[in-house]
Amino acid sequence: MRVGLTGGIASGKSTVSDLLAGFGAVIVDSDKIAREVVEPGTPGLAAVVEEFGPSVLTETGELDRAKVGEIVFADEGARARLNAIVHPLVGARSAELEEAGRSAGKLVVNDIPLLVEAGYAPFFDEVIVVDVPVETQVERAVARGMTEADARSRISAQASREERLAVATYVIDNTGTLDDLRKRVREIYDSLA
């Protein structure tokens, strides 16, 4: 069984992911893997430098994410070229981690922030959506140090609540207490494991 986990910015998806891991699930975190595949010394970083030039490196030889962001968010073609390098590497590493988790008899959960936006929902048997109202997302993002304008901009750039809920087989309402959240995550874990 393939399980996906998603939620909008400041919805509490990372907390749900941590809780699932605490209950015994293997978490395949696409954001962490995307960073891993372009670490210094990897073929991924070499391919990015070959495509975009050495100006995308910091003085210490790491990927300068801010510089890459400037390039790819201003140019759709550049973004497509970056995705063509990184996405296959993330996919291959994710598959390795999924297989290792399954071989160990564990529930494997793919933590994919942009699962809906990327059109990945059909590739999963179950999709867990962490849900909160938009105003709650804004409040939480601002409490983390983001400006309200930036928070609203990021939220509007993501799938809507309705789009996420439309693909959900499990919904986690994360507007209650941490104990409420823990109980709901445990219910879902128990039904899937």
Image (spheres, rainbow, N blue to C red):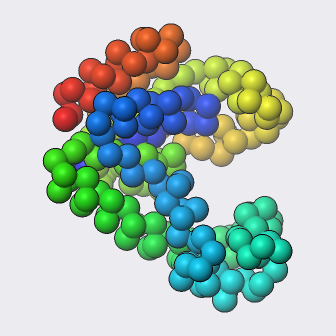
For the point 37% across and 37% down, which residue is it?
Answer: 21
User: Which percent across, then down, holds residue 127?
Assistant: 33, 39
Quarter assignment of residue 191: top left
Left or right placement of residue 1 versus residue 87 in this view: left
Left or right placement of residue 46 versus residue 188 in this view: right
Quarter assignment of residue 181: top left
For the point 66% across and 89% down, which residue is it?
Answer: 50
**Residue 165 shows in the view:** no
Q: Nearer the viewer, residue 114 or 184?
A: 184
For the point 64% across and 26% down, which residue is it?
Answer: 137
Quarter assignment of residue 156: top right
User: Which percent across, then down, holds residue 3?
Assistant: 29, 44
**Residue 150 shows in the view:** yes
In the image, residue 9 sits, relative to residue 79, either above or below, namely above
The tally of labels here is: 0
User: Which percent across, then down, holds residue 41?
Assistant: 59, 80
For the point 29% across and 57% down, which residue is it?
Answer: 98
Left or right placement of residue 74 versus residue 25 in this view: right
In the image, residue 160 sits, relative to residue 108, either above or below, namely above
In the image, residue 158 sits, relative to residue 96, either above or below, namely above
In the image, residue 158 sits, relative to residue 130, either above or below, namely below
Quarter of the image where the C terminus is located: top left
Left or right placement of residue 84 versus residue 106 in this view: right
User: Which percent across, then down, holds residue 65?
Assistant: 73, 63
